[in-house]
C-alpha cells in the first residue's frame, strides 16, 4: 500500500489494511531493507573493484597508445598489451561475479527463478489450474479464472480453512455482500485513503503506478548497469527500501531526477497523484447512493459487532470469520496470480478485552518452532531465525498470547496445506509499516519465484475499527464487563446553576454552561478551590472567545462516590487475514517438481499436493481396454463416490505410464489400476510405490489415507507390495 | 424479467436468462394464469351475487323510505325494514365469502400467510440466520448478511450441491471473477436488454418498477374493493396474467388509465422507461474500459468453452459448473431474501450434441414421480399433478432425456435438503415465456408464504450462447465429431476463370468473381445448365448494380465428391441454474414449526433441518454445573471436533429444557446431555426421544447419524432408551 505523505507522519493516519498487509508491492524490498544500513559487503567491494579495474583498463589503454605513438620497441608494446588483456579478463570476471551477486546471491539468481516460474506457469495454464479471464476477448489484466483443478484446490483450501479455524475455534462465520455503501467505507477510511500514486503518459494517457516505474528503474540500473559506483548503488537500494514511504512530491522529484519516461512510448510523465483503488458503482436507480465493491471483508464483521456479541451471549473473547471476494482496481496489475483485481480473502476478527489478551489454548502452540523475523533482526541486517513461539511471546517479541496463538495456528494451517516450512517466515512489521493504533503486526511470508510474498497478515489492530464505526454510525460498538461486586468509584460532578448564569450572561448562558460542563477534572478542581477561597474566578469560554467571571453561586463542583456495576469498553481486534489466491500460488510452486520418465527421455511434471488439497484424490485405470476391467473400475468408482472421494476414471487406451504421468501433473496422489477382477493395485504418486488390495477394500484404503486416518507408510506396511514391469512404461 | 416490447415478438429477441428464470416478479400471477381463460367460478358468481344484492338493498331502502313518506301502516313498514335487514345480512355474508375467495381460497388466506411469514422472519432475524446488511447505518434495501447459523446452512447447502452435482457427475467446476468487461455482456445481450421498466415520481425523483405499481394496484383493487364488477375483476386479473408481456407504452397507458400515482407522495409519475439492472463500474484507472458486476455466472463458463472441451479430451457431453456471487441492481427490492441485489448462484452448463440428447444415467431417475405442471395443464386451467419422470420424457412432455435427467436430479437435491415435496413442483415455461432459441424450459418452483417461487431454472438453451460468443469474439466455440469412416459428400465447386473474366470486365473483374462464388447451389446449377445449352447467360452482379454477360469459358461449375472426416457443430447447452438464497429461504419456511413447551404455557420454535443442512449438528450440555460433567463435555467435544462434527458446548446454568429450546430454534438435530461420568444421553430434536450411550460412543453415534450412515430409527432400536423427568423442564 502506498503511504500518502512522508515517512512516519503518514502512517499515523493510516486506517485498516493500510499498512502493507496484502498490499506491499511484491518485491524484494523488505528483503533488502537491512541493506539500507549494511550494504552487502561482497557486492560493494565488487563494485569498487570493478570501478578500479575500469580506471586501470583506461590507463593501460592510454599507455599502449602512448607507446605506439612514441614508436616504442615491440616487446615493450607487447608487454603493455598483455597487461591490458589481463586487466580486461579481470574486468570480465568481476562483472560476472557482480552480476551473480546482484541477481540474488549464487548462480541460481533471478534468471533461474524466472525460468522456474515459466515452467510452473506453463504447466498450470496448460492443465487449466488457472486461465486468464475472458481469454477469447483477449483478457483483462489482473483477472484470472480457476479452471477445474485450480477450482478444486481452492475449494479444498477453503474447506480446510473452515475446519481448521471456524470449526475448531467455534468462530462465528458470516457472509456479507460485496456491494458496500459509501458511508461504511468512509468510516473505515478507504474512501479517503485507499489510494496508489499514479502517473500518466502525457501524450497517450496510459496510466502507471509511480512507485513501480521508480522501482523498475532502480532494479534495472542495479542489475544491468554494472558500471555504477557503489555509492550510486547504495542510493538506488535506499530508494527501493523506502519506496513505500515516499510522498507524491518525493516520488515525482525522483522520477524527474532520473529522467524516467513512459516505458512504451518514452513520452514524458505527469506528476504523481492519488488514484482510489476501489471499484466504484451506484446502488439503486437514482444515482444518489454511491457504493463500492468491498476492498476487504473485514468491514462486514465490524458493522455487525453488536449483534455478534449478543449472539455470543454478550461474552468476550470471540472470533467472527468471513470468506469472500474482495476487489482492488489496480492501476497496472503485474505478477500473475499475486496481484489481481479480484480475489478471495478469508478474514478472522478476534474480539478481545484489551486488558486481557491471554489465550486459553496458547499452550497448544507454544512449543512450535519456526522461522521468525522480528523487527530488531531486520533493522540490524540479520536473517530470520527459528524461535520457539512460547519464547517469542514470553520475551515480548510477539506482543501477546492471542496474537501468538494465531501465528502458531497460521503456521500449522500453511504447512498442513503443503507450504514448505523452510520457505515460510513470520516477519514483524517495522515501526513505519504499522498504523499508529496497531499494537503489533506479523506477516506470514512465503518465498516463491517472486521473492518473499506476504500471504497472511496477523495484526493486533487495537480498538480502531470499532471506534471508527461507533463514531460514524452513532451506535456504540462496545462490550460490558459485569463486576461480581459493584465497585465504588469517585466521579467528578459539575452542576451549573442555570438560573444564576442566565441572569448574569443572558443569551450567552448556553455557551458558559457547556464550557463549565466540559472542564477536565484538574481544571474543575482548581476552579472549585479558587471559588472557595476567592468566591469568584475568571474563566475562558472558548465559544465566546473571551473570559467571563464565574461566581461561587453559579456552579457546584463536587466529587461524589458512585457504585458501578460494570465496565464498558471497546474491544481490541486481532485480525488474521488470508490472501487465498497468493497462498494457492505459492503452494503450486512449492509442490512442483520434475523427474525423468522411466525411459529417461523426458522430464515429467509432478505436483506433490497432500491429499487434503489435491484437486482429485484418485484415478481409476483399467490396465488394458477390457470390458471386465472397466466393470470393476465402475464398481470402485461408485464406492469412491459414495465415500465422497473425488476421482476420475480413465479408460482411454493410452499406456499406463502415460496415464500416470498425466495425473501426476495434476497432483493426484493415488491411482487404482485394475489388472484383475478380484484385486487391484494402488500407486502412491511421489514414491511410485504400489500395493495390492482387494477390489472391495480399494475405496476404503484410499479414503482412509486421503482423510488422514492412516498414513501411506502404514498402508505400505500392511498390504502386499506390487512390482510390475507394466506399472510404468 | 421484463419483456421489452409486445408479447410474442419480443421474446424472439431475448438473450440468456431473459425469460423469467430467477427473475419473474415473485407473485401469484403464473398461478393465476389459467384464470385468464376460466375465472374462478365461485368468485365470479359471488361478485354477481354481491352486485345483485347491492341493487336489492338500494331498491328495498328506497321502498322503505317511500312507505314512510306515504305514511304506510306500521306493520307494513316493519315488514319492509325486516326485508331490508335480511338483505343486509345476506350482503355481509356474501362479502365475507368473497373476501375469503379473493384472499386465496379457504380461511387461511394471505393474511395467515403473512402472519406465518412474520413469525418465521422474527425467529430468523433474532437468531441471526440473516441480518439486513449495514444495519447500524440503517441498511441498504436488497442487501442481507447471513449471520452464523444462516452462513452455516448456506455452506452446507453449497457443499451438498458440490457433492450431488459436481462430484457425482464429474463436472468441471470453474471459478471466474465477478468483474466482467463490457464486451462479454454485450455479446450475451445483457448490455442492451437486461432491463426493467421504471417510472419516477415527477416531483421527488423516487424510482419505482412500473409493473410493480400496476400489479399492486390490481391486487389491492381485487382484494379490498369488493364492489367491483366481475367484468372489472376479470380485466384486472388479465392484466396480472400478462404483466410480464406489457411494453413500456402499454404499461404507461394502464398507469394513466387507472390514475396510479407515486405510493408515498401521490405525485404524478413519469412514463415508463428501461433501466439496466447491472451494477456498472470501470476497470483500471483510465476510465476507458467499462465493466459490470456479472448478473449471472454462466458467461464465465461459455467464454471458456474451448479450453474446457479440450480439458475433457475433446469429448461431448460434459458439464461445467460454477458457484458464485451475481449482482442485479434492482429498482426497488422487496420480498426480503427472495429479491436481493447480490446473491449466490450455482449454475451448470451441460454441453451436448444437439443430435443426441440421450442421457446414460436417465434410468436412475426415470421412476421418480413428483408434481409437474406442463404447459397444457396451465393453459387449460388444471393444476400440477404427479407424473412419473420416465413417462414425461417418453411422451415428449419434457423435450429430451438430458433435460429430464436434470429435472430428476434437481428434485432429489431439493427434497434431500428438506424441501417439502408436496410444495415443490416443476412448471414448464409457456411459449411466451421462453426465448425463441430455447427448446424447453422447466422451473423448480417452491411454495412458500410469498406463493410459488421460482428457485431453479432448467433450460435447454440450444446453441444460442456459444453462437453469440463465437460471433463476437471470432473464436469458434464448436465441437468436432470424428467419423469412424470418412463420409463421402457431394460439394458444389464454382471455379471462375480469372483470365477470361479479366479480359472481359477489367476493373470490375473482382466484383464479378465474388458474385459468381457467392451463388447458392440452385442458382449455380441453373447457370451451369444455361451455359451448356446457350453458351452465355445474363448474370446480375449486385455490387455493380447491373447485369453482365457470362460466357461458358468464364466459369467452371461442377459437383464433386469429397471425403469428410468429421462433423463440426455448435453444442447445445442444457442449463440448471440455482438461486441458492431462494432455496435457503424456502427451506427455512418448510423447516419451521411451533410446539408447546412442556408446561404448555408457551409456543416454542423449531427448525426441522435434516442433519445435512443443520447449522450445528450437535450440542453438548452438562446437566448441571459441575466440574466433572464439564470435563466429560470437553472430552466429547474434542472427539466431535476430530470427526468434523460442528457443535456447541453450553455450560450455562440455564435449565436443560431452556437449553433444548434454544437449540431447537437453531435446528440443531442432536443434543448430548452429560448426566454421569460414564454415559450420556443423546436427544433427537423432533421426536424428543433420548437414548443412553457410553461417553466413548457418543461422538461416533452422532457422526454416523449426521453423515447418513445410520438412521435415528436404527440408533433408537440399538441403544437403551432414556426417559427422565429432568430431560424437559
Image (cartoon, coloured by chain):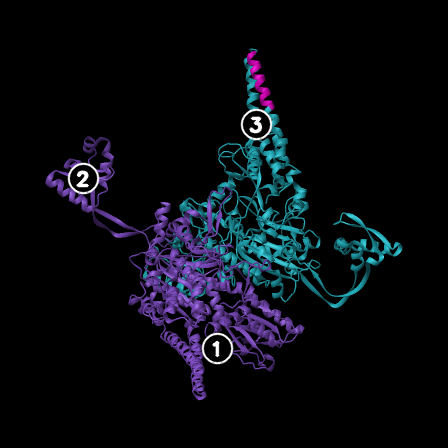
Chain colours: A cyan, B purple
The chain under label 3 reads: A
Q: Let me know if residue A56 is in the magenta part.
A: yes
How far across and how far down the image is residue A174, in percent? Answer: 55, 60
As measured in the structure, the alpha-carbon distance from the residue carrying label 2 to the one carrying label 1 is 86 Å
Frontmost residue, B653 versus A10: A10
Give the foreground label among 3 and 1: 1
How far across and how far down the image is residue B236, in percent? Answer: 39, 66
Badge 3 and badge 1 both on one subunit: no
Q: Secondary structure at mark 1?
A: helix
As measured in the structure, the alpha-carbon distance from the residue carrying label 3 to the one carrying label 2 is 80 Å
Q: Which mark is residue B40?
A: none
Q: Which residues are magenta?
A: A55-69
| Tag 1 residue | B713
How far across and how far down the image is residue B333, in percent? Answer: 49, 60
Res. A15 visible in picture? yes
Instruction: Please indicate whether residue B562 sits to the left or right of residue B597 in the image.
Output: left
Figure disc tally: 3
Q: Which mark is residue B539?
A: 2
Res. A650 visible in picture? no
Say which label, 2 or 1, has the lower sequence index: 2
Residue occupying the far front of the picture: B70
Give the foreground label among 2 and 1: 2
Q: Is residue B673 above or below residue A159?
A: below
Frontmost residue, B32 versus A149: B32
Quarter of the image where one finds residue B573: bottom left
| Tag 3 residue | A91
As measured in the structure, the alpha-carbon distance from the residue carrying label 3 to the one carrying label 1 is 87 Å
Frontmost residue, B10 versus B159: B10
Amino acid at each position: 500500500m502506498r503511504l500518502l505523505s512522508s515517512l512516519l507522519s503518514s502512517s499515523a493516519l493510516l486506517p485498516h489494511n493500510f499498512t502493507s498487509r496484502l498490499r506491499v508491492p511484491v518485491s524484494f524490498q523488505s528483503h533488502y531493507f537491512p541493506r539500507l544500513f549494511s550494504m552487502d559487503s561482497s557486492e560493494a567491494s565488487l563494485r569498487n573493484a570493478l570501478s578500479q579495474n575500469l580506471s586501470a583498463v583506461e590507463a593501460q589503454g592510454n599507455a599502449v597508445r602512448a607507446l605506439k605513438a612514441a614508436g616504442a620497441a615491440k616487446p615493450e608494446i607487447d608487454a603493455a598489451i598483455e597487461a591490458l588483456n589481463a586487466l580486461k579478463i579481470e574486468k570480465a570476471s568481476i562483472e560476472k561475479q557482480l552480476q551473480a551477486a546482484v541477481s540474488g546471491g549464487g548462480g541460481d539468481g533471478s534468471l533461474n527463478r524466472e525460468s522456474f516460474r515459466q515452467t510452473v506457469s506453463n504447466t498450470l495454464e496448460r492443465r487449466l489450474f488457472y486461465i486468464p479471464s475472458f481469454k477469447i476477448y483477449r483478457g483483462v489484466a489482473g483477472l484470472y479464472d480457476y479452471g477445474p483443478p485450480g477450482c478444486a484446490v481452492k475449494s479444498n483450501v477453503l474447506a480446510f480453512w473452515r475446519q481448521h479455524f471456524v470449526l475448531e475455534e467455534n468462530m462465528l462465520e458470516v457472509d456479507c455482500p460485496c456491494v458496500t455503501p459509501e458511508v461504511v467505507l468512509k468510516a473505515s477510511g478507504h474512501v479517503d485513503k485507499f489510494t496508489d500514486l499514479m502517473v500518466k503518459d502525457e501524450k497517450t494517457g496510459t496510466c502507471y503506478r509511480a512507485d513501480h516505474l521508480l522501482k523498475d528503474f532502480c532494479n534495472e540500473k542495479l542489475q544491468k548497469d554494472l558500471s555504477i559506483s557503489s555509492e550510486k548503488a547504495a542510493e538506488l537500494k535506499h530508494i527501493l527500501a523506502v519506496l513505500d514511504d515516499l510522498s507524491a512530491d518525493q516520488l515525482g522529484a525522483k522520477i524527474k531526477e532520473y529522467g524516467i519516461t513512459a516505458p512504451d512510448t518514452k513520452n514524458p510523465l505527469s506528476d504523481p497523484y492519488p488514484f482510489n483503488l476501489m471499484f466504484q458503482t451506484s446502488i439503486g436507480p437514482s444515482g444518489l447512493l454511491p457504493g463500492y465493491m468491498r476492498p476487504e471483508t473485514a468491514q462486514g464483521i465490524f458493522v455487525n459487532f453488536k449483534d455478534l456479541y449478543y449472539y455470543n451471549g454478550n461474552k468476550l473473547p470471540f472470533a467472527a470469520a468471513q470468506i469472500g471476494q474482495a476487489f482492488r482496481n489496480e492501476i497496472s496489475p503485474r505478477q500473475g496470480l499475486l496481484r489481481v483485481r479480484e480475489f478471495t480473502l478469508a478474514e478472522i476478527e478476534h474480539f478481545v478485552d484489551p486488558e486481557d489478551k491471554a489465550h486459553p489454548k496458547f499452550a497448544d502452540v507454544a512449543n512450535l518452532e519456526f522461522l521468525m523475523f522480528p523487527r530488531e533482526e531486520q533493522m540490524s541486517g540479520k536473517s530470520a531465525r527459528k524461535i520457539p513461539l512460547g519464547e517469542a511471546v514470553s520475551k515480548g517479541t510477539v506482543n501477546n498470547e492471542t496474537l501468538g496463538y494465531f501465528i502458531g495456528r497460521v503456521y500449522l494451517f500453511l504447512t498442513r496445506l503443503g507450504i514448505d516450512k523452510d520457505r515460510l517466515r513470520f516477519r514483524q512489521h517495522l515501526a513505519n509499516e504499522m498504523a499508529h493504533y496497531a499494537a503489533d503486526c506479523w506477516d506470514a511470508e512465503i518465498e516463491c519465484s517472486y521473492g518473499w510474498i506476504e500471504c497472511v497478515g496477523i495484526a493486533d489492530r487495537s480498538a480502531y475499527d470499532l471506534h471508527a464505526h461507533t463514531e460514524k454510525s452513532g451506535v456504540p460498538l462496545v462490550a460490558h464487563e459485569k463486576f461480581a461486586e459493584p465497585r465504588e468509584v469517585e466521579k467528578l460532578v459539575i452542576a451549573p446553576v442555570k438560573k444564576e448564569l442566565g441572569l448574569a450572561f443572558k443569551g450567552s448562558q448556553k455557551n458558559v454552561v457547556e464550557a463549565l460542563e466540559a472542564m477536565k477534572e484538574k481544571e474543575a478542581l482548581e476552579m472549585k478551590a479558587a471559588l472557595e477561597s476567592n468566591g469568584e474566578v475568571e474563566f475562558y469560554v472558548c465559544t465566546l472567545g473571551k473570559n467571563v467571571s464565574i461566581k461561587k453561586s453559579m456552579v457546584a463542583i463536587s466529587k461524589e462516590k458512585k457504585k458501578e456495576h460494570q465496565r464498558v469498553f471497546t474491544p481490541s481486534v486481532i485480525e488474521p487475514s488470508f490472501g487465498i489466491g497468493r497462498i494457492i500460488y505459492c503452494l503450486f510452486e512449492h509442490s512442483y517438481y520434475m523427474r525423468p520418465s522411466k525411459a529417461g527421455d523426458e522430464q515429467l511434471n509432478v505436483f506433490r499436493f497432500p491429499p487434503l488439497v489435491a484437486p482429485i484424490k484418485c484415478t481409476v485405470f483399467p490396465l488394458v481396454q477390457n470390458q471386465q476391467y472397466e466393470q470393476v473400475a465402475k464398481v470402485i468408482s461408485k464406492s469412491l463416490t459414495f465415500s465422497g472421494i473425488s476421482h476420475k476414471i480413465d479408460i482411454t487406451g493410452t499406456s499406463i505410464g502415460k496415464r500416470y504421468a498425466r495425473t501426476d501433473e495434476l497432483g493426484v496422489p493415488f491411482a487404482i489400476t485394475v489388472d484383475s477382477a478380484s484385486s487391484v493395485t494402488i500407486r502412491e504418486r511421489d514414491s511410485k510405490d504400489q500395493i495390492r488390495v482387494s477390489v472391495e477394500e480399494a475405496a476404503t484404503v484410499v479414503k482412509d489415507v486421503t482423510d488422514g486416518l492412516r498414513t501411506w507408510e502404514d498402508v505400505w506396511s500392511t498390504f502386499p507390495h506390487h512390482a510390475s514391469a507394466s506399472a510404468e512404461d
